[in-house]
Amino acid sequence: MKALSWIAAPLWPLQLVSGQKSFRANPLLGSPGLNRRGLHLARVRLAEKMAESRRKRLSARIDPALKARYEANGYLVIENFLPPDEFAALKRDLEENPLRSWERREGSTVTRRGSLDLPDIEGRAALERLMTGHRISDLLRYLAGCGGEPLIHLQTILAEGDAARPDPQNTLHMDTFHSTAKSWLYLQDVGEEDGPLRYVPGSHRMTPARLEWERELSIGAARNPDPEIAAGSFRVSDAMLEKLGYADAKALAVPANTLVVANTHGFHARKASTRPTLRSEVYGSLRRNPFLPVSGMHLHSLPGLKGRLSTRQAQIDELLARYLGVKGPWISVPPKRIGDPASI
Ligand SMILES: [Fe+2]
């Protein structure tokens, strides 16, 4: 075992009640014996129960019709999310004015992150209204089943449409072992061929068959040859979906100005692009310790962090690279408008 892993040893027991999901990084979480006796399962069940209780407290701000749709499917599709004038102004701004940006490559796909931190969008009225409003954040909190401050930035997917270099995001998977949410406000139409989100309706619910599948997979997960499974993000095949009693995945091809929000404990993937695609969206995510009894008190809500999360993330990446030699996947690139080509 690497020296660095042993330095982390005192944290291993504490991580049992945290969001740590990697079976490989923590020998307790990865222990075949403990997982045979139900360690992973106990974490899944307790996290689900606690998310349910926090979700109830967060539900007052959510439209009852949206709640019912979420309960049934695990995701929401809201067309015409912004008034047409507001959407047009927002899009025009991002086409004309660059944002501070970072890029990463996975297979034949480049993902770009543009900062929507409040200092970066000062004076850009439509963006400011979107980022100081609560609509996206409230939905992310409800679906994630936790309070706190989501991370929201501009995301651009530049897919080269090369099937020979697969992207791990194209395989149906769950992000982690507990409720967590992601959102996409699409700035262009997303057709079937443009790499839309696929989601397995109802897979946010933990059925007995699903729990048994997770228990079995957890026993050998630490040594699973698929690094994503060893890291706690279980992959599922179409045949297994059927065995588990879930419906087929649905590709969410939607028009521009649609907000999609999904609980990514449910099975989802980005459908592979069959042609070169450039797509931008205001992207949000919220994931916190699933065992917190409270829904408030989030570090990201503190002054200096709230509205500045992209900047802080970039600073942390820089410190890790400089002092620990740990290089993250994100590379700083010159400021970009939507529509600009990739730099990496
Ligand atoms: Fe995912």
Image: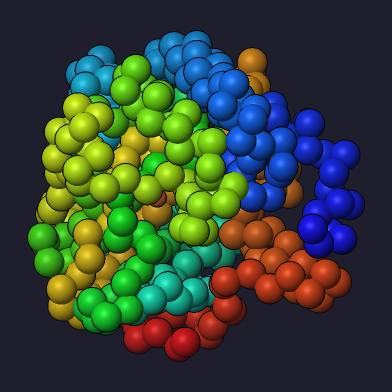
Q: From the viewer's perspective, is 148 left or right of 73? A: right
In the depicted view, which residue is nearer to us: 246 or 215? 215
Q: Is residue 256 above or below residue 81?
A: below
Residue 161 x %, y %: 22, 78
Residue 64 seen anywhere in this rendered image of the structure: yes
Residue 93 x %, y %: 34, 68
Residue 141 x %, y %: 46, 30
The residue at 59%/29% (across/down) is: 35
In the depicted view, which residue is nearer to us: 174 or 133? 174
Residue 263 x %, y %: 37, 35
Q: How many marks?
A: 0
Q: How is the image coloured?
A: rainbow
Which quarter of the figure is the N terminus placed in? bottom right
Q: Is residue 38 above or below residue 241?
A: above
The residue at 20%/70% (across/down) is: 273
The residue at 30%/50% (across/down) is: 172
Residue 58 seen anywhere in this rendered image of the structure: no
The residue at 69%/50% (across/down) is: 25
Residue 313 sits in quarter? bottom right
In the depicted view, which residue is nearer to us: 51 or 62? 51
In the depicted view, which residue is nearer to us: 230 or 206? 230
